[in-house]
Amino acid sequence: MSHVFDLHTHSTASDGALSPELLVEKASTVGIDTLALTDHDTVSGLAAAHSAAKKHDVTLINGIELSCLWNNKTIHIVGLNFKAENKTIIDATTHLNHLREERAIKIGEKLKKVGIENAYENAKRIAAGGTVTRQHFSTYLIENGNAKNQTDVFKRYLVNNKPGYASVEWPSLEETIAQINGAGGISVIAHPLRYKLTATKLRRLIKEFKEHGGKAIEVVTGHNQSNEIEMATAYAKRYDIAASVGSDFHSGNTPWSQLGNLAELPRGLTPVWELW
Ligand code: AMP
Ligand code: MN
Ligand code: MN
Ligand code: MN
Protein backbone atom coordinates (compact mmCIF):
# COMPACT_ATOMS: atom_id res chain seq x y z
CA MET A 1 0.00 0.00 0.00
CA SER A 2 1.42 3.34 -0.92
CA HIS A 3 1.32 6.21 1.48
CA VAL A 4 0.99 9.83 0.51
CA PHE A 5 2.83 12.28 2.74
CA ASP A 6 2.82 16.08 2.79
CA LEU A 7 4.91 17.37 5.66
CA HIS A 8 5.04 21.12 5.00
CA THR A 9 1.80 23.13 4.83
CA HIS A 10 0.33 26.41 6.08
CA SER A 11 -3.07 27.47 7.43
CA THR A 12 -4.67 30.73 8.56
CA ALA A 13 -2.75 30.30 11.83
CA SER A 14 0.09 31.89 9.80
CA ASP A 15 0.00 32.88 6.12
CA GLY A 16 -2.07 30.09 4.56
CA ALA A 17 -5.45 30.74 2.98
CA LEU A 18 -7.35 27.80 4.49
CA SER A 19 -8.34 27.30 8.11
CA PRO A 20 -6.70 24.26 9.75
CA GLU A 21 -10.02 22.39 9.38
CA LEU A 22 -10.38 23.15 5.68
CA LEU A 23 -6.72 22.35 5.05
CA VAL A 24 -7.13 18.89 6.58
CA GLU A 25 -10.35 18.33 4.66
CA LYS A 26 -8.65 19.30 1.41
CA ALA A 27 -5.69 17.05 2.23
CA SER A 28 -8.08 14.16 2.70
CA THR A 29 -9.81 14.96 -0.60
CA VAL A 30 -6.56 14.89 -2.56
CA GLY A 31 -5.54 11.56 -1.00
CA ILE A 32 -2.96 12.56 1.61
CA ASP A 33 -2.67 9.96 4.40
CA THR A 34 -0.14 11.79 6.58
CA LEU A 35 -0.14 15.57 6.84
CA ALA A 36 1.99 17.95 8.89
CA LEU A 37 0.68 21.45 9.55
CA THR A 38 3.80 23.63 9.75
CA ASP A 39 2.72 27.22 10.29
CA HIS A 40 5.36 29.93 10.66
CA ASP A 41 6.46 30.21 14.30
CA THR A 42 3.20 29.00 15.81
CA VAL A 43 1.43 25.83 16.95
CA SER A 44 -1.92 27.58 17.34
CA GLY A 45 -3.56 25.73 14.43
CA LEU A 46 -2.67 22.24 15.62
CA ALA A 47 -5.58 21.58 17.99
CA ALA A 48 -8.21 22.36 15.35
CA ALA A 49 -6.24 20.38 12.76
CA HIS A 50 -6.17 17.34 15.05
CA SER A 51 -9.95 17.34 15.51
CA ALA A 52 -10.46 17.64 11.76
CA ALA A 53 -7.90 14.89 11.11
CA LYS A 54 -9.91 12.44 13.24
CA LYS A 55 -13.03 13.25 11.28
CA HIS A 56 -11.36 12.85 7.88
CA ASP A 57 -9.17 9.86 8.67
CA VAL A 58 -5.91 11.71 8.08
CA THR A 59 -2.84 11.16 10.27
CA LEU A 60 -1.82 14.60 11.49
CA ILE A 61 1.78 15.16 12.57
CA ASN A 62 2.55 18.13 14.83
CA GLY A 63 4.60 20.60 12.83
CA ILE A 64 6.04 24.12 12.81
CA GLU A 65 8.27 26.18 10.51
CA LEU A 66 10.72 28.10 12.67
CA SER A 67 12.59 31.18 11.44
CA CYS A 68 16.24 31.26 12.44
CA LEU A 69 19.52 32.92 11.53
CA TRP A 70 22.55 31.15 10.14
CA ASN A 71 25.48 33.12 8.82
CA ASN A 72 23.32 36.24 8.84
CA LYS A 73 20.70 34.64 6.61
CA THR A 74 17.15 33.67 7.48
CA ILE A 75 16.78 29.90 7.28
CA HIS A 76 13.56 27.97 7.87
CA ILE A 77 13.66 24.86 10.02
CA VAL A 78 10.63 22.60 9.97
CA GLY A 79 10.02 20.83 13.27
CA LEU A 80 8.05 17.58 13.05
CA ASN A 81 6.39 15.22 15.51
CA PHE A 82 7.26 17.15 18.67
CA LYS A 83 5.09 17.53 21.76
CA ALA A 84 3.05 20.64 21.03
CA GLU A 85 2.39 21.38 24.69
CA ASN A 86 6.13 21.40 25.44
CA LYS A 87 7.16 24.57 27.29
CA THR A 88 10.34 25.13 25.25
CA ILE A 89 8.32 25.18 22.03
CA ILE A 90 5.60 27.40 23.47
CA ASP A 91 8.18 29.86 24.83
CA ALA A 92 10.00 29.86 21.49
CA THR A 93 6.81 30.76 19.62
CA THR A 94 6.03 33.55 22.11
CA HIS A 95 9.47 35.04 21.52
CA LEU A 96 9.27 34.64 17.73
CA ASN A 97 5.86 36.29 17.58
CA HIS A 98 7.19 39.18 19.64
CA LEU A 99 10.01 39.59 17.09
CA ARG A 100 7.47 39.40 14.27
CA GLU A 101 5.30 42.05 15.90
CA GLU A 102 8.29 44.40 16.30
CA ARG A 103 9.30 43.83 12.70
CA ALA A 104 5.75 44.40 11.44
CA ILE A 105 5.65 47.78 13.22
CA LYS A 106 8.99 48.70 11.59
CA ILE A 107 7.78 47.61 8.15
CA GLY A 108 4.70 49.80 8.67
CA GLU A 109 6.88 52.80 9.58
CA LYS A 110 9.13 52.25 6.58
CA LEU A 111 6.25 51.98 4.15
CA LYS A 112 4.79 55.16 5.61
CA LYS A 113 7.99 56.96 4.60
CA VAL A 114 7.26 56.10 0.97
CA GLY A 115 3.68 57.30 1.30
CA ILE A 116 1.90 54.03 2.12
CA GLU A 117 -0.28 54.63 5.16
CA ASN A 118 -1.58 52.09 7.70
CA ALA A 119 0.20 49.06 6.24
CA TYR A 120 0.82 47.60 9.70
CA GLU A 121 -2.85 47.90 10.70
CA ASN A 122 -3.94 46.34 7.42
CA ALA A 123 -1.41 43.51 7.58
CA LYS A 124 -2.72 42.75 11.08
CA ARG A 125 -6.30 42.86 9.80
CA ILE A 126 -5.44 40.39 7.02
CA ALA A 127 -3.47 38.13 9.39
CA ALA A 128 -6.70 38.00 11.45
CA GLY A 129 -5.06 36.84 14.66
CA GLY A 130 -2.54 34.52 12.96
CA THR A 131 1.23 35.04 12.93
CA VAL A 132 1.91 38.26 11.01
CA THR A 133 4.22 37.65 8.05
CA ARG A 134 5.51 39.54 5.02
CA GLN A 135 2.84 37.64 3.09
CA HIS A 136 0.17 39.72 4.85
CA PHE A 137 1.95 42.94 3.90
CA SER A 138 2.18 41.61 0.38
CA THR A 139 -1.57 40.99 0.23
CA TYR A 140 -2.23 44.49 1.48
CA LEU A 141 0.14 46.17 -0.98
CA ILE A 142 -1.57 44.38 -3.86
CA GLU A 143 -5.00 45.28 -2.46
CA ASN A 144 -3.83 48.90 -2.13
CA GLY A 145 -2.66 49.00 -5.76
CA ASN A 146 1.06 49.33 -5.02
CA ALA A 147 2.02 46.18 -6.90
CA LYS A 148 0.32 43.82 -9.31
CA ASN A 149 1.26 40.42 -7.87
CA GLN A 150 3.30 38.62 -5.21
CA THR A 151 6.51 38.33 -7.18
CA ASP A 152 6.33 42.02 -7.98
CA VAL A 153 5.53 43.10 -4.42
CA PHE A 154 8.36 41.07 -2.89
CA LYS A 155 10.84 42.31 -5.46
CA ARG A 156 9.89 45.96 -5.10
CA TYR A 157 9.04 46.33 -1.42
CA LEU A 158 9.64 43.51 1.00
CA VAL A 159 13.23 42.37 0.51
CA ASN A 160 16.60 43.74 1.62
CA ASN A 161 17.39 47.24 0.29
CA LYS A 162 13.76 47.93 -0.59
CA PRO A 163 11.48 50.45 1.18
CA GLY A 164 9.40 47.93 3.17
CA TYR A 165 12.15 45.71 4.53
CA ALA A 166 13.16 45.34 8.14
CA SER A 167 15.68 42.75 9.30
CA VAL A 168 15.03 40.50 12.31
CA GLU A 169 17.42 39.01 14.84
CA TRP A 170 15.91 35.53 14.65
CA PRO A 171 17.30 32.94 17.11
CA SER A 172 20.32 30.96 15.96
CA LEU A 173 20.17 27.70 14.06
CA GLU A 174 21.70 25.87 17.00
CA GLU A 175 19.13 27.20 19.47
CA THR A 176 16.27 26.38 17.09
CA ILE A 177 17.34 22.76 16.63
CA ALA A 178 17.77 22.44 20.40
CA GLN A 179 14.20 23.66 20.94
CA ILE A 180 12.73 21.11 18.53
CA ASN A 181 14.89 18.30 19.88
CA GLY A 182 14.03 19.34 23.43
CA ALA A 183 10.35 18.86 22.62
CA GLY A 184 11.02 15.37 21.25
CA GLY A 185 10.79 16.41 17.61
CA ILE A 186 12.77 16.11 14.40
CA SER A 187 14.44 19.11 12.76
CA VAL A 188 14.32 19.43 8.97
CA ILE A 189 15.94 22.08 6.75
CA ALA A 190 13.02 23.51 4.75
CA HIS A 191 13.45 24.06 0.99
CA PRO A 192 17.29 23.90 1.09
CA LEU A 193 17.72 25.14 -2.47
CA ARG A 194 15.72 28.33 -2.00
CA TYR A 195 18.21 30.32 0.08
CA LYS A 196 20.45 31.30 -2.84
CA LEU A 197 23.45 29.88 -0.99
CA THR A 198 26.57 28.89 -2.89
CA ALA A 199 27.23 25.14 -2.96
CA THR A 200 30.03 25.61 -0.42
CA LYS A 201 27.77 27.51 2.00
CA LEU A 202 24.91 25.04 1.60
CA ARG A 203 27.26 22.16 2.39
CA ARG A 204 28.41 24.03 5.49
CA LEU A 205 24.82 24.67 6.51
CA ILE A 206 23.91 20.98 6.24
CA LYS A 207 27.08 19.91 8.05
CA GLU A 208 26.55 22.33 10.95
CA PHE A 209 22.83 21.51 11.06
CA LYS A 210 23.70 17.84 11.48
CA GLU A 211 26.36 18.56 14.10
CA HIS A 212 23.78 20.50 16.14
CA GLY A 213 21.34 17.57 16.04
CA GLY A 214 19.38 18.22 12.83
CA LYS A 215 18.01 15.09 11.21
CA ALA A 216 16.68 15.71 7.68
CA ILE A 217 16.40 17.99 4.67
CA GLU A 218 13.45 18.49 2.37
CA VAL A 219 14.24 16.64 -0.82
CA VAL A 220 10.88 16.84 -2.54
CA THR A 221 9.19 20.25 -2.22
CA GLY A 222 6.44 22.09 -4.06
CA HIS A 223 8.98 24.35 -5.74
CA ASN A 224 11.28 21.78 -7.29
CA GLN A 225 12.82 22.65 -10.64
CA SER A 226 13.82 19.73 -12.85
CA ASN A 227 17.22 18.89 -11.34
CA GLU A 228 16.58 20.03 -7.77
CA ILE A 229 15.36 16.68 -6.46
CA GLU A 230 18.58 15.10 -7.71
CA MET A 231 20.67 17.82 -6.12
CA ALA A 232 18.92 17.54 -2.76
CA THR A 233 19.14 13.73 -2.94
CA ALA A 234 22.89 14.00 -3.42
CA TYR A 235 23.18 16.26 -0.36
CA ALA A 236 21.08 13.91 1.78
CA LYS A 237 23.26 10.97 0.77
CA ARG A 238 26.55 12.81 1.15
CA TYR A 239 25.70 13.95 4.68
CA ASP A 240 23.80 10.80 5.56
CA ILE A 241 20.66 12.52 6.75
CA ALA A 242 17.00 11.67 6.24
CA ALA A 243 14.75 13.12 3.56
CA SER A 244 11.40 14.88 3.88
CA VAL A 245 8.58 15.64 1.47
CA GLY A 246 6.44 18.78 1.69
CA SER A 247 4.57 21.04 -0.71
CA ASP A 248 4.83 24.29 1.32
CA PHE A 249 1.20 24.75 0.37
CA HIS A 250 -0.21 28.21 1.20
CA SER A 251 -3.20 28.64 -1.11
CA GLY A 252 -4.67 27.43 -4.36
CA ASN A 253 -3.20 30.45 -6.13
CA THR A 254 0.36 29.19 -6.35
CA PRO A 255 0.38 26.42 -8.96
CA TRP A 256 3.93 25.29 -8.06
CA SER A 257 3.01 24.27 -4.54
CA GLN A 258 -0.23 22.34 -4.59
CA LEU A 259 -1.25 20.09 -1.74
CA GLY A 260 -0.26 16.46 -2.18
CA ASN A 261 0.89 16.93 -5.76
CA LEU A 262 4.46 15.85 -5.12
CA ALA A 263 7.07 13.71 -6.79
CA GLU A 264 8.07 10.39 -5.18
CA LEU A 265 11.03 10.39 -2.84
CA PRO A 266 13.98 8.85 -4.74
CA ARG A 267 15.07 5.38 -3.62
CA GLY A 268 18.06 4.91 -1.38
CA LEU A 269 17.10 7.72 1.04
CA THR A 270 15.81 7.38 4.59
CA PRO A 271 12.33 8.92 4.68
CA VAL A 272 11.98 11.25 7.67
CA TRP A 273 8.87 9.36 8.84
CA GLU A 274 10.99 6.30 9.52
CA LEU A 275 12.50 8.34 12.37
CA TRP A 276 9.24 8.43 14.35
P1 AMP B 1 8.25 36.11 6.71
O1 AMP B 1 8.48 34.77 7.35
O2 AMP B 1 7.31 36.98 7.48
O3 AMP B 1 9.51 36.80 6.35
O4 AMP B 1 7.46 35.85 5.36
C1 AMP B 1 7.93 34.89 4.50
C2 AMP B 1 6.76 34.37 3.69
O5 AMP B 1 6.48 35.26 2.65
C3 AMP B 1 7.11 33.05 3.01
O6 AMP B 1 6.80 31.97 3.82
C4 AMP B 1 6.23 33.09 1.80
O7 AMP B 1 4.94 32.70 2.17
C5 AMP B 1 6.21 34.54 1.44
N1 AMP B 1 7.24 34.91 0.46
C6 AMP B 1 8.53 35.21 0.69
N2 AMP B 1 9.16 35.55 -0.46
C7 AMP B 1 8.24 35.46 -1.44
C8 AMP B 1 8.24 35.70 -2.84
N3 AMP B 1 9.34 36.10 -3.49
N4 AMP B 1 7.10 35.49 -3.50
C9 AMP B 1 5.99 35.10 -2.88
N5 AMP B 1 5.92 34.87 -1.56
C10 AMP B 1 7.02 35.05 -0.84
MN1 MN C 1 4.77 31.54 4.21
MN1 MN D 1 9.78 28.68 4.28
MN1 MN E 1 6.56 27.16 4.50
Image: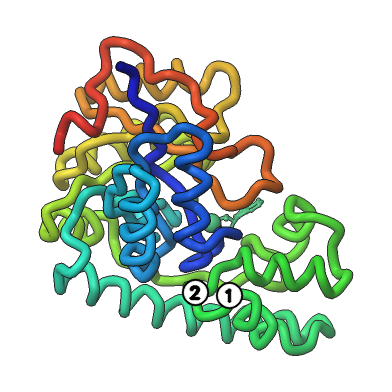
Q: Which residue is mark 2?
A: 130
Is 147 situated left or right of 224 in this image?
right
Q: Is residue 107 above or below residue 201?
A: below
Looking at numbered disc 2 in the image, what kind of residue is underneath it? Gly
Look at 44% across and 28% down and name the residue there. 220
Q: How is the image coloured?
A: rainbow
To which quarter of the image does residue 98 belong? Answer: bottom left
Q: Position of residue 104 (x, y in %)?
A: 56, 80
Q: Residue furthest front?
A: 55
Tell me, yes or no, if residue 77 can be seen here. Answer: no
Look at 42% across and 45% down and name the residue there. 8
Q: Is residue 235 above or below residue 252?
A: above
Is 74 situated left or right of 188 in this image?
right
Q: Residue furthest top?
A: 267
Q: Nearer the viewer, residue 87 or 68?
A: 87
Q: The N terminus appears in which quarter of the rendering? A: top left
Q: Which residue is mark 1?
A: 127
**SS at badge 2:** loop
Q: Is mark 2 in CB contact (under 8 Å) with mark 1?
A: yes
Looking at numbered disc 1 in the image, what kind of residue is underneath it? Ala
